[in-house]
Image (cartoon, rainbow, N blue to C red):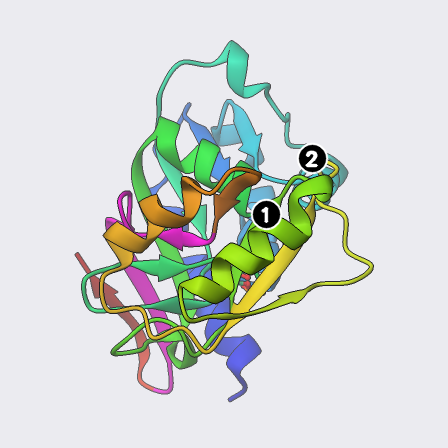
Amino acid sequence: MSQDQFKKMAAEAAIPFIEPGSIVGVGTGSTVTHFINALGDIRHDIQGAVSSSEASTKQLKSLGIEVMDLNSVGSFDVYVDGADEITAHKHMIKGGGAALTREKIVAAVARQFICIIDDSKQVDVLGRFPLPVEVIPMARSYVARELVKLGGDPQWRQGVVTDNGNHIIDVHNLKILNPVELETHINNIVGVVTNGLFAQRGADIVLIGGANGVQTIK
Ligand code: 5RP
């Protein structure tokens, strides 16, 4: 079986966590694409979705799922999203799809974060996957210099503009031993919108697709 089939298994395993009549927070990426397809099958059982990207919004709407404005809903139960890396502490690196800021906002409002991944995403220490940082375009070079001071090797993801009109810097060669602290530190650099460490608000439940089926970590 392929990694994509493992992603699909994890995505479909998230469906039983969706309560009838609820609003569902929806992430972004290839694993979430499988989740949205599965959500399409139960679209009459949910109130609607809050989306973390234009891409997910488009797919949700194409399946007839109502996309609600986050400002018009209160808190909701479940946010489902993938990750680029995740540790045993359920700390993550996200943002490979450049949707990290909206993902972090929607995740903050949800009571539970359900992370859906294939088994290649599990790591002991975060940082092999370059850490995405969303920056205000005019601050790009300044932020890059500050990231060098932290020991990273920042690279501008050229040609990518986020849904918020900003740029992405991918920080290579960081060995992230204290993700909670580093998340705050990078967010405090002037010009940073947010960074792809999801440690202060990590996942609550992880569904991992692999050769032996789906493993659930709570
Ligand atoms: C997008 C993300 C994705 O969740 C992350 O990149 C994982 O993507 P995929 O499911 O395609 O492996 O954070 O910004």
Extreme top residue here?
Answer: 72
Write down the region rendered in magenta. Answer: 196-211
Mark positioned earlier in the residue sequence (1 or 2):
1
Q: Is residue 56 visible?
A: yes
Q: Please, is residue 38 above or below residue 84 in the view? A: above
- C-alpha separation, residue under disc 1 versus residue under disc 2: 9 Å
Q: Which residue occupies 45% across, 69% down? A: 9
Residue under label 2: 164
Extreme right residue here?
Answer: 159
Q: Amino acid at mark 1?
A: Glu
Q: Amino acid at mark 2?
A: Asn
In the drawing, does residue 111 fall left or right of residue 137?
left
Residue under label 1: 134
* Residue 110: numbered disc: none
| Residue 132 location (% of width, % of height) | 54, 59
Give yes or no for residue 202 being in the magenta stretch: yes
- Residue depth check, mark 1 versus mark 2: number of the one nearer the observer: 1
Q: Residues within 10 Å of mark 1 (few under 14, many from 20)?
A: many
In the drawing, does residue 83 fall left or right of residue 143?
left
Q: Quadrant of ligand 1?
A: bottom right
Q: Of residues 163 and 11, which is closer to you in this image?
A: 163
CB atoms at circles 1 and 2 under 8 Å apart?
yes
In the drawing, does residue 108 fall left or right of residue 59?
left
Q: Secondary structure at mark 1?
A: strand
Q: Residues within 10 Å of mark 2 (few under 14, many from 20)?
A: few
Q: Please, is residue 89 above or below residue 187 in the view? A: below
